[in-house]
Image: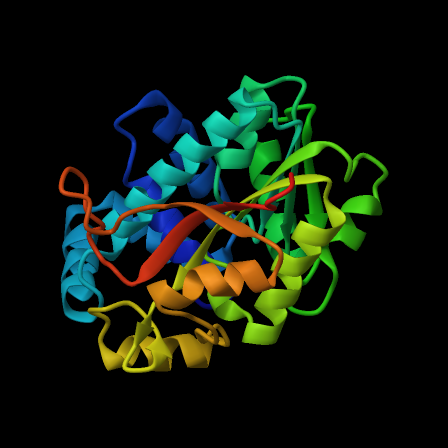
Amino acid sequence: MSSVSTSMLVAAATVQRTRAHVEAEDAAIARACLAQCGGAGSALLWLVDHAFGRLVLAWLERVLLPGLRAHYAWRKRRIAQWARQACADGAAQVVLLGAGYDGLGCMLARRHPGLRVFELDREASIAIKRRALQALCLHPTGLYLRATDLARADPLAALRSGGDFDPKLPTLCIAEGVLMYLSQAQASALLSALARDLARPTVVATAMDLRAGRPGFHREHAWVRRWLARRGEPFLWGCGRPELTAALSACGLQLQALADPADPVDPDPSPGEWLFLARRPDA
């Protein structure tokens, strides 16, 4: 990988969060993935490992999208809480759509030996993740890495291809930072497939809010949109809060919980992305 991707930026932010033991393992996986990302990954690691580099990253964040790294941490804390609760409530499978370089799947597989965890992402990202886990000697028996393009392929077909996935089992599906890169039709088709083809689905996902009629963070600089477009990762779909419930309902899902960006105790440091939990009404 010759240039920086959004997955790499999320991984770099994760490397800086090592206060707790679970975060330390998550950061180790993110670091190992960046080490497999060529020159761009090495450059990001240098920046996060050196005081001057961290100052540069902090300045860029203040100018371009204030609070972004803290937003990633805020988002991941809530997803991890919901995932742990879903496992406690009887989820037998977890599917991470667009898993990137995150360590949540590995953590869940290690903590719950009977759980089946499936990570889906593009072939290049899966190859990097596989090499990183091998370098760390992390081989949870219940973790499966599957290559697929969520914008072009049916994720359930990729899951069924290995024979280990059972659509009849209670399944937690996590789509963190995925839906905004799909068109409205693609996002709706993905959510509809999860609701239709899984017997007892729980869906945790993020969707961009609308800013001046376009999907984006509330405080992002115009350059962010141009950079994403050059990277081939433009935000394509978003919706306002009033429309989110209706959009999920049209896909056969019912909104169960929404992370409050204005939480007085722990507000979202960079608002503009909805984090929600949904289920099929009859599941």
Q: Quadrant of residue 230?
A: bottom left
The residue shown at (15%, 37%) is 265
Q: Residue 102 versus residue 4: which sits nearer the camera?
A: 102
Residue sitting nearer the eye, 121 or 166: 166
Percent coordinates x, y for residue 134 in the rendering:
62, 33
Residue 47 placed where, x, y %?
27, 53
Tell me where residue 96 appears, x and y as whole percent: 58, 44
Q: Is residue 49 visible?
A: yes
Q: How is the image coloured?
A: rainbow
Q: Is residue 202 above or below residue 222?
A: above
For the point 14% across and 63% down, the residue is 62
- The residue closer to the viewer here, 260 or 6, is 260
Q: Is residue 157 left or right of residue 147?
A: right
Residue 72: percent from the left, percent from the top? 32, 49
Viewer can see residue 136? no
Residue at 50 percent of width and 57 percent of height: 38
Q: How many numbered marks are there? A: 0
Q: Quadrant of the C terminus?
A: top right
In the image, is residue 109 above or below residue 54? above
- Left or right, residue 236 beside residue 46: right
